[in-house]
Image (spheres, grey):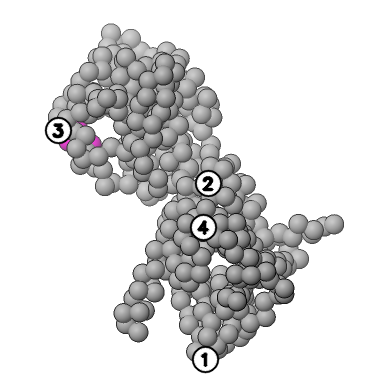
Amino acid sequence: MAKSEIRVGGLGGQGVILLGHIIGKAASIYDSKHATLIQAFGPEARGSACSAQVTVADEAIGYPYVKNPDFLVIMSPDAYTQFAPQLKPTGTLLYENELITIDDRLPAGARALGIPATRFAEELGRRLVLNIVMVGFFAGVTGLLSKDAMEKAVKGSVPKGTEELNLRAFRKGYEYGVELIGAATVTG
Amino acid sequence: MDESPELVSLRNGTKVTIRPMVAGDGPALLSFFRGLPQEDRQFLRDDVTRPEVIERFVAKLDDDSVIPLVAEHEGRLVGDGTLHRTRHGWEVHVAALRVVVARDFQRSGLGTALAHQLVRRAVGLGLDKLVAEVVDNQIGARRAFEKLGFHQEATLKGHVKDIHGAKHDLVIMANDVSHIWERMEALVADYSPTAGD
């Protein structure tokens, strides 16, 4: 059975849980797969460590906890420090590359792909959509779920009136991810 | 941004397509503006009966500080709406809306439809505040903007002159659309739903 384990980490206020929720929703509602979501919050409303564990599979999931993820989506240095060592050696790290510096915590063999998601979100008009840029980046890089399912999940998860900018944020991240993968394939 | 044309049904059942302005719209746009009565053109910022002015509009289509829409009915342009914003400085979060409708399409809901599209695009661009200028006797336009959430924020006394030389007050209407993002802010708060229980 095909099963992918994903860990999302960042700070409260970056939309970590929403990011995980959208991946799970795209998988389970729009791509006919199974998905689970576990969320962990810090004690403060904002700025404390926050993470989500998402499992996506073709069949029912018996154990929803993620110990060694296939994909690690990281938006803060603290989350990188905490979760990078847990990534599978064959796994992929997707990270905010203007906030995080990669070091030897990353397991040998793991692939690291960065995106200036915060800057992109600010250029689009709202820093708030940083997590949606990361959702798009995840979709573009991993190809785990269809673009259509991911877009529908974004549109169905954000407040009315904000869909257009959120979809632009998704597409920005998606296109950047697809280009990065294309460049890596050509040079690699 | 969603650039696809939208078919709008007006109050009298007439169907009009609202779409982004394209480079080929120049001649039709000139006809549209030349067809406006002088009293309507009086309140526009440029002499839109001059071809070079229209050419300047069309040449600026790649400039992301102006987002122009047109309304088309049976191959004829019957409305023009633009969103103007600055890309730098202290008003970077603000945009101004301008809407002009052909005389035979006024009071049909077309102005409201154009303004609605512009508001939607403004929110999509992450803008916080929208403003529109209306002359005091343009009651219909004021009501249309009010329906879209605008309110009277300021009045410039005797600020504009009509074609007879009579002075009118210019009403500045404003719409704070930033509240739309408050729900998004709550959504990305990553706050435990059980915290404080």
What residue is at 42 percent from the left and 16 percent from the top? B12
Q: Which residue in the protein does label 4 denote?
A: A149
Residue situated in front as seen by the camera: B135 or B120: B120
Sooner in the amino-acid sequence: mark 2 or mark 4? 4
In screen coordinates, is B27 left or right of A21?
left
Q: Which residue in the protein does label 2 denote?
A: A162
Residue situated in front as seen by the camera: B173 or B9: B9
**Quadrant position of the C terminus of chain B in the picture:** bottom right
Structural distance between the alpha carbons of marks 3 and 2: 38 Å
Q: Which residue in the protein does label 1 denote?
A: A108
Specify start and end residues of the magenta stretch as a single range.
Answer: B53-57
Residue situated in front as seen by the camera: A116 or A147: A147
Say whether residue B106 is visible.
yes
Single out the residue that lies furthest toward the left. B51
Mark 3 crowd level (few <14, some 14–19, many ≥20, 10 Å Cα): few
- Which amino acid type corresponds to the residue marked 1 in the rendered image? Ala
Measured as percent of width and height from the top left, residue A68 is found at 63, 82
- Which amino acid type corresponds to the residue marked 4 in the rendered image? Ala
Mark 4 crowd level (few <14, some 14–19, many ≥20, 10 Å Cα): many
Is A175 drawn above or below residue A101 in the view shown?
above
Q: Main secondary structure of the magenta part?
A: helix
Q: Which residue in the protein does label 3 denote?
A: B52
